Amino acid sequence: MSILVNRDTRLLVQGLTGREGEFHSRAMLEYGTTLVAGVTPGKGGQSAIDDRIPVFDTVAEAVEQTGANASCIFVPAAFAPDAMLEAAEAGLPLVICITEGVPALDMLRVYHVLKQKGVRLIGPNCPGLTSVDEAKVGIIPGGIHTRGAVGLVSRSGTLTYEVVQAMTDAGVGQTTCVGIGGDPIVGTSFIDVLDMFNQDPETEAIVMIGEIGGEEEEKAAAFCAREVRKPMAAFIAGRTAPPGRRMGHAGAIISAAGAGTAESKRTALQEAGIRVADSPSHIPRLLREAGVR
Amino acid sequence: MKLQEYRSKAILARHGVPLLSGETATTPEEARAAAERIGGAVVVKAQVLVGGRGKAGGVKLAATPDEAEARAREIIGLDIKGVTVKTLLIASAADIAHEYYLALILDRASRAITVIASAEGGVEIEETAKTNPEAILRMPLHPLIGLQEHQVRRVAFFLGIPAELRKDFATVMRGLADAFSASDADLAEINPLVVTDDGRLLALDAKIVLDDSALPRHPDLEAMRDLNEEEPSEIAAREAGISFIKLDGSIGCMVNGAGLAMTTMDLVKLAGGEPANFLDIGGGAKAERVAAAFKIILDDPNVKAILINIFGGITRGDEVARGIVEARSLLTRDVPMVVRIVGTNSEEAKPILAEANLITADSLDDAAAKAVEAARAGSAA
């Protein structure tokens, strides 16, 4: 078992024929992901990646012809909101948007439309996710994983790889690693993924990687204290980062006093009984201390 | 991106928000001429993006054009939290009967544009939020429908807007919401919104912060960027597509990804050093961008060593390695460089780095320790 994607995932890639889309689609195929279609408007009828993958003009057509049940989006930021809506309109239950730089007000609308439709959106501005030895969707390097019993959720991109590599090097394998993305409005929160890991029988322990800004880590800590009985370790980036730009008085009014700093997040996690690492390389040791084999 | 008061007011005015827009001036003479055209008492206001300008002496009343010129002379050139005042806003002075606070902010927690309003406006609003939170209204707008009439009424009643001004208040509220959406803002704040002695509702001060991700579709707003208040190195970084924040330490950092860049800084500190900067070269970093990053880092004379940490995903390690070697050959100043490249195409990167005699490291902790050591050796030499 794993969460979100597995061997039954039939993936289509929106923007497959672009430079990044093709590079990473090839890597997904090599990993063993069942990649069934690409969508690039105007290139329908062609095939890509050494003629292995058919390309369609629309997501609806790709779904009808190939039975795709998830989409990964690599289109430029200006077209990404529309691409997410098209995927949802075509009935896909899972959409992973890698694109960074999507305007927040566009995301606001997309978020609520997809939520109403019951679509699970990961991202945008995220590295995607890997269910180890089953399916890799997005841009996480496949070689860093090893199969095991720890689930990982992170707000960062490359920092996620750093932690996964440290775990693999120490022989601590993973079930699924999910990058939820660092934008102000993302489809899936820490709590959503923590809840899935908590209910996944194969995931025995959980790693959470956060960073300064917002209050999602603090909320996740409260959720963990309430709901999660599995061993956990965490890392928060940004202890040395200068305080972020102030969003006028309104920003201070809307957030809880002192929330958002690395120390506030570390304290909240520690108070929830979660071991917090000073370096990504310490995560495997903390997991072992928490009882992970 | 933050907009100056006069820019923010111009946007609000375009959406029908009543205000005393005034004129900008960059010399005392211009200030006098503006005061003459406006007539009556005016306020001379420093246009800076940092907070606390009033307390720093950047906002002054002037009863006559003579006084406006004198006050402008005092304020131009004033240093407010490291920013030298170059531009003033000259606007009619208003006799204030009552002040309110009114803002819209993109609240990531509730995933909604949220109204924040209080009848206790002015500079003490954050204090009010702590001591008397009931005095502040927080109301999310519908994400798809936006501001609705009953919401406008709710805010007006909450604030206790006089009956005869409720129609004007609706204009302010709708104008603020329209301005927020039309300019893709993260924040649009009126503080204070005032009722004057003669019964007018006016926005006396305004602040708009724009969503940087949306700027590509607003070239008119991008053109309003105030380069006067940015570090030259930060301007150069943005033009090269790099996100960069200058700090005070001696170890320059070049990293792909914001989270990993912050982690690299944290580990430099943990190893006993101080980071000289935050630098994220972004996804898919090309050789040219690496070269630009080098230049930006080395323009800081405090930098004694550079730590390059690249974990490949979208970014390909061999491209970065080639970029590092190529860019380094063009540098006028050289410092020890510790390079760590892992992930996509990292194997292809290794021979390129080895050939160029760069200090390499496999783990991030090791890389941070080596960079701290190299910076110390560099400082001692």
Image (tube, rainbow, N blue to C red):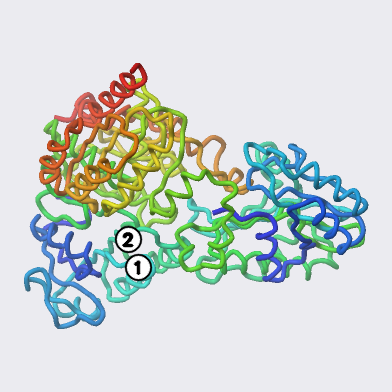
Q: Is residue A289 above or below residue A93?
A: above
Callout 1, which amino acid?
A: Ala
Please check whether the numbered discs 1 and 2 fall on a single chain: yes
Residue at (30, 67) in percent of width and height: A75
Give the position of the C terminus of chain A as an image quadrant: top left
Q: Is residue B222 above or below residue B323?
A: below
| Disc 1 crowd, CA 10 A, few/some/many (<14, 14-19, 20+) | many
- Front residue of this view, candidates B97 and B376: B376
Task: Give residue A282's position: percent from left, percent from top.
Answer: 25, 27
Q: Residue furthest top?
A: B380
Relative to B160, is B147 on the left or the right?
left
Under circle 1, the secondary element is helix
Picture quadrant of residue B350: top left
Residue at (57, 63) in percent of width and height: B141
Q: Are marks 1 and 2 in contact (CB under 8 Å)?
A: yes
- Front residue of this view, candidates A139 and B345: B345
Under circle 2, the secondary element is loop
Task: Give residue B7's position: percent from left, percent from top.
Answer: 66, 60
Q: Is residue B225 above or below residue B256?
A: below
Task: Give residue B89's position: percent from left, percent from top.
Answer: 75, 55
Question: What numbered label is drawn on residue A99?
Answer: 2
Picture quadrant of residue A126: bottom left
Q: Chain of mark 1?
A: A
Instruction: Look at mark 1 in the image and give the residue it sits on.
Output: A80
Task: Give residue A37's position: percent from left, percent from top.
Answer: 15, 72
Relative to B13, is A85 on the left or the right?
left
Counting residues from the N terminus, which is met first, the one under dot 1 or under dot 2? 1
CA–CA distance in space, label 1 to label 2? 7 Å
Picture quadrant of residue B327: top left
Callout 2, which amino acid?
A: Thr
